[in-house]
Every structure is written in C-alpha cells, then in structure tokens.
Image (cartoon, helix red, strand yellow):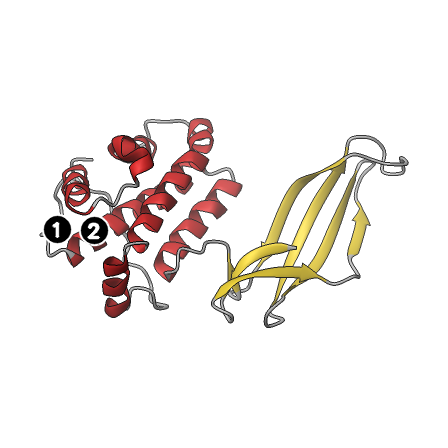
Amino acid sequence: MLNFMCSQCADVRSFVSSEKLSCLIVGERQFSIDAYLNCAGCDAAIEAWFLVVSRDGLHAQAPTVRLERYVDNRRGVASRSVTGTREFDLLLERAQVAFEAGLGAGAMVYLRQAFELITKQVAHLAGMTVKERGSFAQLLKTVDENHHIIPRAFSKDGYRLFSELSVVVHGNSTEAIALQKFRPCEMLVRGVIANVFSDNDMRQAIDQLGWNRDEPYASAGDEKGA
C-alpha cells in the first residue's frame, strides 16, 4: 500500500495491490515484485516494481529483507506531492525523481525554482514590483518582512536556505553533498509553501487567480545577485 494524490479523486488516497502479486527470483538473495496498485476511492491504477534483498538466503526460515529499489509508473493518474497546486506539485515531483536518480544538483534546481516561484507569487499578490533581473535575496527579505512566508520554526535560517540551494545550483558543490542536503532542504521548501497556503487570504487570492488549476508552471529562472 502506498499513498498518492489521486488526480481523479483530487485527494490523497491509498493505492493498494491485489492479493495476487508477480514475483521473480533474480539472484541468490534478491527477488522482484511487480504489482498494480489501485486507488481505494476510484480504482485508478498505477504500476509498481520493487526489488527486495534478503540479508540471508531467500529460503531461510525467517529471512530479514530490505527494499533495495522501487520504481512506479503513475501514468498521470497520481502524484506524490500534495501542496494543493499543480505547479508546485510538478516541481517537487521532478525534484524527487532527480534525487532518486542520483542527480543531486538537478534535484536542488527544482527546489530552488519552487522556492523562488512561491516568493514571487506572494510578491505579485501584494502588489510588489518584481524586477526581471533583480536580486532575489532582497526580494525574499522584503516579502518575508511584510508577509512572513518563512515558517517561524526556521525564520532565522530562511535566507540561509536560499544560499544552500544557490551554492549547489551554481556548481559550487559536489553531487554527494547535494544529495545529502536534499531532504532537509526539501522539508524547508515544503514548509514555506505550506505556510503560504495556510494563510486564508493568500489562499483565496491564489484560487481567484487560478494558480491551483492544471496549468503549466512558469519556470523561475536564475536570478542575478543570488
């Protein structure tokens, strides 16, 4: 069972496998599982593949196993991210896919795009002037001072978050370090997005502008002065 945002139900649902699974032994201590997972709410289906490794032999009485690799094919019917808007879900999903492929820098690029996009959208809603080539760091500071988009729990480190993302994006880090920093950076970016959408006035304005509809997102390019 896995949880996804179901496109048809427009809500988080459990996707559950049937009782019959397809298993194949691929090594002395490895086997793969192929399964169809169906949404508990509407029966939408996705494909999933699991590679499982046993610490001992597979024929041991009670083998200890771990999941080595997992791949799914959601075919547009489900997504992992549940921010509530398609544009942010797409960015965060692509960040996750890049991370799973071992592309740390690529994953961090998508996180930075999401961080820049939410900041600029709040600025537009507030009637602020967003310069095409202006300093994003200054814009972030101004937006946060007026609208407190950075959650209180890490408000002192909000600008450091942007710096962490920028260091990787600009090639001043290794893939190993980028992969190591991905999870905490992802958590903080999600925190900023959730903080904005928890503001009822902001949420209402975003809904009125149609930013939560199935529209392609506007890519946030690199900014000067990062």
Total number of numbered discs in the rendering: 2
Residue at figure coordinates x 80%, y 50% from the top left: 24
Near-viewer residue (48 or 12):
12
Give the CA distance from mark 2 to mark 1: 7 Å
Asked if labels 1 and 2 touch by Cβ distance under 8 angstroms, the answer is: yes
Quadrant of the frame with the N terminus: bottom right
Which residue bears the numbered disc 1?
130
The spot of residue 81 in percent (x, y) is 46, 54
Amino acid type, mark 1: Val
Report whether 174 appears left or right of 48: left
Please tell me the numbered disc located at residue 147.
none
Image point 57% across, 55% down: which residue?
A: 3
Disc on res. 120: 2
Q: Which residue occupies 32% across, 45% down?
A: 192
Residue drawn at x 37%, y 68% is 214
The percent coordinates of residue 43 (x first, y second) are: 63, 71
